[in-house]
Amino acid sequence: MTDADTSAPPSGTGCVECDAADGWWMYLRRCAACGHIGCCDSSPGKHATAHFEQTGHRVMQSFEPGEDWFWDFVAGESIEGPELAPPTSHPQSQPAPGPRGRVPLDWRAIVNGAEG
């Protein structure tokens, strides 16, 4: 993997775009090239994929506690990756979905695509 910057810290503890809009997310992903934190494709904003589409930064890593897997958007598959700068996940106290206080009560219906 050539585009990883192992010295780039994460951009924060939550999805940059969701935080800016007082939104919420299911799970978080970290760009291996720049440290941008975005939300997964199960989240309403799908900001990790949007970051890839806007920047071409093709590799991301899970930013969930206890997970260390990488995904290559171009290859469409899991890959091995280097150890990135800490922290390697959002705080354990931050729930998924999160963040606390911004997740709507009907989040399951939203995530599952239900209407109403």
Image: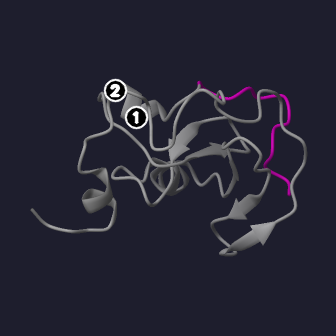
Dot 1 corresponds to which residue?
17
Decide whether residue 5 is among the magenta residues: yes
Instruction: Judge the density around disc 2: few (<14), some (14-19), many (≥20) Cα neighbours within 10 Å.
Output: few
At 60% across and 26% down in the image, what residue appears?
93
51 horizontally vs 57: left or right: left
The number of numbered discs placed on residues in the rendered structure image is 2
> Do the residues under discs 1 and 2 have CB atoms within 8 angstroms?
no
Amino acid type of disc 2? Gly
User: Is residue 2 shown left or right of residue 97?
Assistant: right
In depth, the one of 111 and 29 nearer the eye is 111
The percent position of residue 116, horizontal first and vertical second, equals 9, 62
User: Residue at position x 44%, y 31% from top?
Assistant: 99
The local secondary structure at tag 2 comes to: loop
Q: Residue at x 40, y 53 (%)?
A: 43
Q: Position of residue 73 (x, y in %)?
A: 63, 66
Q: Position of residue 39 (x, y in %)?
A: 49, 46
Q: Which residues are magenta?
A: 1-12
Magenta-highlighted stretch: main secondary structure?
Answer: loop
Q: Nearer the viewer, residue 42 or 97?
A: 97
Where on the picture, by quarter, is residue 77? bottom right
- Say if the magenta span includes residue 22: no
From this view, report whether residue 73 is shown above or below residue 101: below
Look at mark 2 in the image and give the residue it sits on: 101
Determine which of the numbered discs, if any, sits on residue 61 in the image.
none
Q: Is residue 12 above or below residue 70?
A: above
The mark that comes first in sequence, 1 or 2, is 1
In terms of secondary structure, where does tag 1 sit?
A: helix
